[in-house]
Amino acid sequence: MQREVLTLENVHKIIAGREIIKGISFSIKEGEVLGFLGPNGAGKSTTLRMIVGLSKPTSGKIEVCGYSIVKDYVKAMSSVGCIIEGPDLYGYMSGMDNLEMLAAMEKNITREDIMDAVRLVEMEKHIHDKVSTYSLGMKQRMGLAQALMNHPKLLILDEPTNGLDPAGINELRNLIRKLSKEEKISVLISSHLIAEIELICDKVSIIKDGAVLRNASVQELLRTKETFFELDDNKKGIEILEKNWGIKGKIRGSKIEAVVDEDKVSEINASFIKEGLKLKFVDNKHKNLEDLFLSITGEN
């Protein structure tokens, strides 16, 4: 059974008398990747700041591995690695020097921990090169290495693909999937690149105006019952759907569109053929996360 690594329950945040965060709740289990989506000003950054202890919730509960971020901050944060505003690196130093300098500020990070992080982000070949020679993608990997040195259970990434080219985005996506599935690290990603979230995340939490509108798995959100049939006689097909199945369909162009349970589709196909119709085409309507996000948030 997967344990919950991050839990937010009914979290509120009031700033200058104005309620910014309005009772949001979501959770991430071990090895899951959750996409935190919302339009600008929705409350994503405020929420991330509360999770990492930079801002205190007005009410509600935030726990990391069972420890309250308010009451047991040190224990909670010992399980967290994060890149909130991009990796902070010194260009005139090597990648290794940057990591060693950061590790020196922590009591428990060893040379072995540093090398483990370097291996995880696949930077062994370039770790002794100056950071000024790194591509943006390599700098992003170094930021991940910084966040991974303390062997976190939870990795928090704020807009991790900003500025990356398609190849860099693909590399980062594969790396995050590897960290979650092989290393069992839970990942919270805040991003505006919805197509990327669809490819990388197991779950999404959609926020607008400080309130969570939807928590669900990506698979669940994209599942649809809208089905298209193309027959040699669509009018007769409409009649069969209503008479035999109690389903109202409508003709759109050359196809019938109807809302059908997935497990009924093969039986309906068989009934069309039994009634002497020729079945030319059948498929589900495919949704993508971006369309769904826009419909849920009402954004144009």
Image: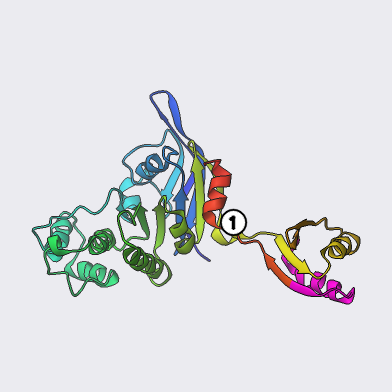
In the image, what residue occupies the spot 84% across and 67% down? 233
Q: Nearer the viewer, residue 264 or 2?
A: 264
Q: Is residue 250 left or right of residue 92?
A: right
SS category of the residue bearing label 1: helix
- Magenta stretch contains residue 236: no
x then y, percent, for residue 159: 35, 52
Q: Nearer the viewer, residue 272 or 27?
A: 272
Q: Is residue 80 left or right of residue 66?
A: left
Is 263 rendered above or below residue 140? below
x then y, percent, for residue 166: 35, 64
Residue 5 visible in image:
no
Question: Which region is colored magenta?
Answer: 260-280
Q: Around disc 1, counting alpha carbons within 10 Å, would you say few (fewer than 14), some (14 to 19), or many (20 or more)? A: some
Q: Give residue 273's quadrant in the image.
A: bottom right
In the image, what residue occupies the spot 59% across and 56% down? 221
In the image, what residue occupies the spot 21% across and 60% down? 108
Q: How many discs appear?
A: 1
Q: Residue under circle 1? A: 221
Is 191 rendered above or below residue 240? above
- Magenta stretch contains residue 265: yes
Q: Main secondary structure of the magenta part?
A: helix
